[in-house]
Amino acid sequence: MSTSSRFVFALALSLAAAAPASAGEVRGRVALGVQGVSFEDAGPVVVYLEGDGGAPLHYELPKRALEIHQKDASFKPSFLVIAAGETVVMPNDDVIFHNVFSYSTPNDFDLGLYPRGESRTKTFQYPGVVRMYCSIHESMSATIFVAPSIWHAVAGSHGEFEIRDVPPGKYRLRTWNRRLPPVSQAIEVKADVVTANLVVASSAAP
């Protein structure tokens, strides 16, 4: 092998070693094993990944605009899933004053009163459920589920879900729903598609 050929071969090896491993994908279906309960009755079912053994995952936050509007004396949307570290903008579109607050620790906050055309922002640093209200209008409520990573999805009307661009590694796949207990499953993601089916039942353990 000539000197130049050896150089090209060595360069190719070094580039291959430096290249990041190809991302994988997690697909599956959530089944509701509770008699007489449908997805419409249960409300949103969130499926998300956390580190194996509860280890924190490192990720880069996506560049996207997250908003919950106050319009017609209600929060729109009334449910949102985000990753820990993301910021939500909350504009007031009504002609009346509104307030947004939450007692959900450690993400509790109070944005105070503000009029139409103004916005407030809140960064949610900690995973968990955040229930939001307006101090003026008791009928107003919304829920934010703060996932521990950017790898999350809301199951479809038939329980189907898809989580893309997952780095290879070992994870725990978990569910959350406001009415039903969570379930979890250990999975390993490689540079392909992992199929994982979960059954949420009243006797399920976290």
Image (cartoon, rainbow, N blue to C red):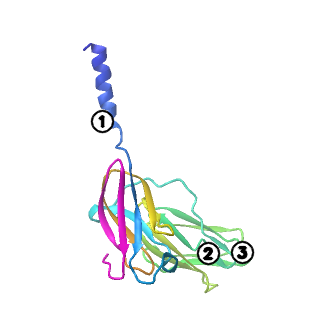
Q: Give the camera-side residue of 50 and 98.
A: 50
Visible residue check, residue 87 = yes
Amino acid found under the numbered disc labelled 1: Ala
Q: Does 202 appear in magenta?
A: yes
Q: Does 196 appear in magenta?
A: yes
Q: Position of residue 103 (x, y in %)?
A: 48, 80
Asked if disc 3 and disc 2 are in contact, CB closer than 8 Å, the reply is no
- Label 2 residue SS: strand
Image point (75%, 76%), residue name: 95
Q: Which of labels 1 and 3 is toward the front?
A: 1
Q: Is residue 151 left or right of residue 17?
A: right
Determine the image quadrant of residue 17.
top left
For this orientation, the residue located farthest to the left is 1
Question: Disc number at residue 75?
Answer: 2
Q: Earlier in the sequence, mark 1 or mark 3?
A: 1
What range of the chain is rendered magenta?
Answer: 182-206
The residue pinned by badge 1 equals: 17
Q: Is residue 101 left or right of residue 155?
A: right
**Real-space Cα distance between discs 1 and 3?**
56 Å
The residue pinned by badge 3 equals: 94
For this orientation, the residue located farthest to the top is 2
Considering the image in quadrants, where does the C terminus appear?
Answer: bottom left
Q: Position of residue 25 (x, y in %)?
A: 40, 53
Amino acid found under the numbered disc labelled 3: Asp
- Does 149 appear above or below 131? above
Q: Give the camera-side residue of 157 and 19.
A: 157
Q: Give the camera-side residue of 171 and 130.
A: 171
Mark 3 Cα-neighbour bin, 10 Å: few <14, some 14–19, many ≥20: some
Q: Earlier in the sequence, mark 1 or mark 2?
A: 1
